[in-house]
Amino acid sequence: MTVNERIRKEMLARGWSQYELAKRAKMQQSTISKWFQSVPTTPSSRSLKKVAKAFDMPIGELLEEKKAPDAVTKEMYEYWLRLNLQEKKSVLQIIKSIVAHR
């Protein structure tokens, strides 16, 4: 997965548009849109630092491939598997609310 794909994945996970990322990273939206064109540009290291800060993650996490989940994530997943569909929807709403209020 390219860094552009990881940025898009993080945006989707947060429900952010290119505009929202640009606003939070204090960047021009036109710069970000170039990363997702049919012939994409690669973000500069300066841009990557701003994006990582906007995502509230270390830049290394943005640059590296997915690593094995930590113990808390594993535990959460085990409980997640025990929930029915309505319970999962409720938990998802709670998570979205927490992330939106950061």
Image: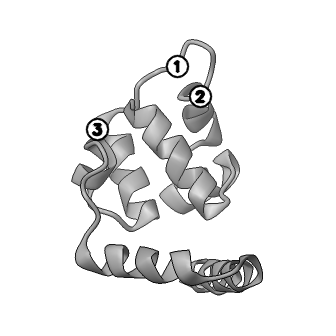
60 w.r.t. 45: above or below: below
Is there a contact, CB below 8 Å, between mark 3 and mark 1?
A: no
Q: Quadrant of the N terminus?
A: top left
Question: Looking at the image, which residue is at 69% across and 51% down?
Answer: 17
Q: Earlier in the sequence, mark 3 or mark 1?
A: 1
- Helix, strand or loop at label 1? It is loop
Question: Looking at the image, which residue is at 48% across and 44% down?
Answer: 7
Residue 50 horizontal/vertical position (percent): 39, 53
Residue 35 horizontal/vertical position (percent): 53, 29
Residue for badge 3: 45
Seen in the image, is 31 located left or right of residue 67?
A: right
Q: Earlier in the sequence, mark 3 or mark 2?
A: 2
Residue 47 horizontal/vertical position (percent): 39, 42
Residue for badge 2: 36
Viewer-closest of 42 and 68: 68
The answer for how far apart the CA atoms under marks 3 and 1 are is 16 Å
Amino acid at circle 2:
Phe
Is there a contact, CB below 8 Å, between mark 1 and mark 2?
A: yes
Any part of residue 27 in sight:
no
Q: Image quarter for residue 20?
A: bottom right
Residue for badge 1: 40
